Each structure stands twice: as C-alpha cells, then as structure tokens.
Amino acid sequence: ADDKYTDKYDKINLQEILENKRLLESYMDCVLGKGKCTPEGKELKDHLQEALETGCEKCTEAQEKGAETSIDYLIKNELEIWKELTAHFDPDGKWRKKYEDRAKSKGIVIPE
C-alpha cells in the first residue's frame, strides 16, 4: 500500500487530543505553522492539505474514521478552530461545504 499514508500513528487517541484544549491547540498551532510540531503533528501537517482535497483517498481506514471524527468534533465543539483551519487550508471554501454538509446530515448544527 505505497499509495497510503503511514499507519504509524493510527493508534493515537484522537478523543484525548480533541477533548484536551491544550493538546488540541498545540496540534492546531503545528498544522497552521504557528508552533512546534510533534512527529505525529508533522505527519498530519505534511498531508492535511492533500487529504482534504482528495477526500482522504490515501488515508488508511483508521485515518479516514479519525478525519471524520475530528471534523465533526471541531464543527460541533470548536467552531472557531474549524473556521481557522478551513480559512488556512481551504480559503476558497471548495471542500468545507462538503464536510459541513456531511456533519449536518449527522444532526450537527452549524451556527451561521
């Protein structure tokens, strides 16, 4: 599976990161180029743009689930972080709508 991203970090506890504001902000600073990166943060930063643009086509199953979980969590609980991420990685809003529509279909309300 050379066309997949490394699965080295697939066992990471995403929920723990998402629910810990300090950890979450540390990862966000990394991917937005505003702070230091852990090895897994750097891996995320290196592939986030491509994964967003391709609908995660090189993601492992765990990464795809993790991406969905993360996006849904951010939209529902950390809207400001979601907006900052989308402004950075999707300034034209090409992909954001797709991810937000998917979240809405799961009953997640997105304040306008």
Image: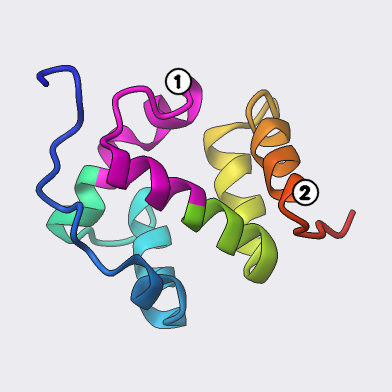
The vertical placement of 98 against 20, above or below, is above
Residue at 78 percent of width and 57 percent of height: 107
Specify the principal SS of the magenta part: helix
Look at the image and tell me whether residue 32 can be seen. no
Residue where numbered disc 1 is placed:
54
- Name the image quarter holding residue 6: top left
Q: Nearer the viewer, residue 41 or 77?
A: 77
Residue where numbered disc 2 is placed:
104
Residue at 14 percent of width and 43 percent of height: 7
Which amino acid, mark 2? Lys
Horizontally, is 12 left or right of 78 in the view?
Answer: left
Q: Are marks 1 and 2 in contact (CB under 8 Å)?
A: no
Residue at 38 percent of width and 37 percent of height: 48
Residue at 75 percent of width and 59 percent of height: 108
Q: Secondary structure at mark 1?
A: helix
The vertical placement of 26 against 45, above or below, is below
Which amino acid, mark 1? Thr
Q: Nearer the viewer, residue 50 or 1?
A: 1
Crowding around mark 2 (Cα neighbors within 10 Å: few <14, some 14 to 19, many 20+) is some
**Span of residues in magenta:** 44-68
Horizontally, is 14 left or right of 109 in the view?
Answer: left
Look at the image and tell me whether residue 54 can be seen. yes
How far from the left and from the top, in percent, is residue 99? 64, 38
